[in-house]
Amino acid sequence: MAIFSSLSEKIQHAFAGLKKKGTLGEDDVMKALKEVQIALLEADVNYKVVKSMMQDIKEKAIGKRVMESLSPAQQVIKIVNEELTSMMGKEQASIVLSPNPPTIIMLCGLQGAGKSTTCAKLANHFKKEHKKVMMAACDVYRPAAIKQLQVLGEALDIPVFFLGDSVSPVDIAKGAIEKAKKSAVDILLVDTAGRMHIDEQMMDELVQMKQEIKPHEILLVVDAMTGQDALHVAEHFNQGLDIDGLLLSKMDGDARGGAAISAKAVTGKPIKFLGTGEKIGDLEAFHPERMASRILGMGDVLTLIERAQEHFDEKKAKELEEKIRKSSFTLQDFLEQMENMKNMGSMEDMMNMIPGMAKQMKQQPIDEKRLGRNRAIIQSMTKIERENPPLIDASRRRRIARGSGTTVQQVNALLKQFGETQKMMKRIGQMGKGGKIPRIPGLFS
Amino acid sequence: MIIDYLIKGLAKTRTGLVDRIEMLVSGYKKLDDSFFEELEEILIQADLGVQTSMDLVETLRIKTKESKIEVAHEAIAMLKKQIQQMLGDDNPSMNLQKDALTVILVVGVNGAGKTTSIAKMAYQLKEQGNKVILAAGDTFRAAATEQLEKWSQDIGVSLIKQKEGADPAAVAYDALQSAIAKKADVLIVDTAGRLHTKINLMEEIKKIKRVLERELPGAPHETLLVLDASTGQNAIEQAKLFNKATGITGIVLTKLDGSAKGGIVIPIADRLDIPVKWIGVGENKEDLKPFNPKDYTDTLFS
């Protein structure tokens, strides 16, 4: 099955017969929207949501003037992207802390959505903001769920309130609040057991808990890989609990995350955080426009830009850019660039954010081990060799291989890879001038 | 009957697919465009994916025309058959060794339900008279070992474990040696949940498999991928990449007691030739059932 990693290509194709036209005609729009519809469904946006979206987009697009700088295809994508972004909430929503601490935050969701992990991540997030945090272990059903939260709490040095698994979750939560008040805790995070949204008895338990502990914030944790059912899950939890926000977990995979739109559309509640990895610090604020690009399969250029800005030295980046333009990119730069990449997060993460790269990754996965080897190879070269790779003849290659503990074949492979990178850099340098590719400040511009 | 469990599970939200099919049967006399469109929508909503749903309905259009079928329920029966063929006609059974140790490796993404499924499987195999040993190979997630330990005590099977953070391949090695020494019938190896896109973690799982293969030729006899029924189109990538890394022999489709249909297993079975072997329909140790393509398809359409 063709997973449309490039929606823009598809739409471009749909517009193939179309030359410069002043406005978008109904036929053109319908053709393009057919592709958009498929892309959204492939991204797991719920069918009903897609259907109503198409109606809105159609109305907005037909008769719209195509802007000077855009092709008709780009114009349609722009409209779709704007619609998606606005559907997911125009701005970032955060958690408002109560003036009378503790602020009680209750987490709920299906089994395996990632509540306990998320609970610890949130606790860590608030602790970093110098808040006094406590977690309450109210999952008395899953074996060792309490223990899991305890272990996480210990690692973070955050207290965990628990009463074992033979006390009712509501009583545990009540006990936790009392304890939190006594210990002047700012934020109390209440972890609950995973449950099916159609399990009335278990849902009643949450409703009862809500009545008893009156949380300031109820967050529904939704797995980013969820399919069509995300709509029903969010609908049921929201009907029962009137939740305050959504948190998408497991965003570090390659799921397009259409569940985000379904859940947002059916509840009207904002997405507040994203879980983006296995590490405790892997919690990010939600950015609607980035999510829209991801769902459309257009990469997450904005996040990449932000990370690039965090980790790249502006001046060095400028120098690099100069080199790219002049095509004087050397192995020394290659090495520095690899080091920078390492600081920015794993290569996989990075590649997933670049449009089109996610697809290439499938064919040629980035191997962190190979990166380490390449580093050793470059480090075994002399300064002159790094600046002038053509100089590296067979005898130098043998020396480099010995010096880096690799083989001549591996040195050859690196030099070949560098040659290709150099070519690519040249192309990017030229494209950047024409403004056709997304500019990445601090990286290539 | 398995089908009863499924119906019980699905009955809770029968407003979905089932009622709509009933509406289709009663509401449409003729097989016109809107009939086929509605069918397509129903399939997409069951997570079969756009492409599979469109292909199925297109084939149905042609076939009903060819066989001059004009009534809705006959067309739906035909569609069911098509889906069953994609799932494979037979009841896929487990590759259990006679009078020798069977090793089962269990893999999947985070939160799919690996540990719970292992417990249920162990319970069932034990009830059938097998001596079962579990290996606590999830040394990453906090308290994962404790979770499996509690289950093992409840079921009454032994568990081989090491410290949190230990090399899972070492746990697998230990457990295998122990299973051989104790003349166990079945060893089930749990692994930490991992996203299929994490290359280092996929390498780790390859290593676990290599260790098992090396120590006992032919092992693992089953490598099962645990898949949450609510997963969307990403499940195809999961199946592909786990299959590439470890050679998946079957799928355990969990959480079918919710409102999700798990329709993604249909394209997976069809394209990757990976059969569904078990379904999880609840939280108790009895709630794991052998997969039956016909029953499953019936519950989608009955």
Image (tube, coloured by chain):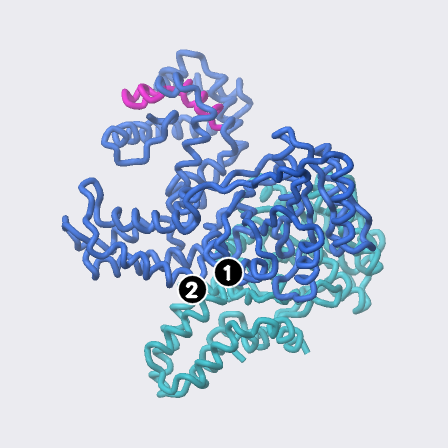
Chain colours: A blue, B cyan
Q: Residue at x 30, y 49 (%)?
A: A79
- Chain under label 1? A
Question: From what the image shows, is residue A217 above or below residue A52?
Answer: above
Q: Secondary structure at mark 1?
A: helix
On whether residue B23 falls in the magenta region, the answer is: no
Magenta stretch: give its range: A320-341
**At x 45% / y 20%, what residue is drawn?**
A336
Q: Residues within 10 Å of mark 1 (few under 14, many from 20)?
A: many
Q: Confirm or deny contact between disc 2 and disc 1 (CB under 8 A).
A: yes
Q: Is residue B65 above or below residue B229?
A: below
Please identify the dominant SS of the magenta region.
helix
Left or right? Give the position of B132 relative to B229. right
Count of marks overlaid on the render: 2
Q: Nearer the viewer, residue B167 or A71?
A: A71
Dot label at residue A48:
2
- Judging by the rendered image, the residue that carries numbered circle 1 is A231
Which amino acid type is marked by label 1? Leu
The residues tagged by marks 2 and 1 sit, at their Cα atoms, a distance apart of: 9 Å
B233 to B256, vertically: above or below: above
Q: Is residue A335 magenta?
A: yes
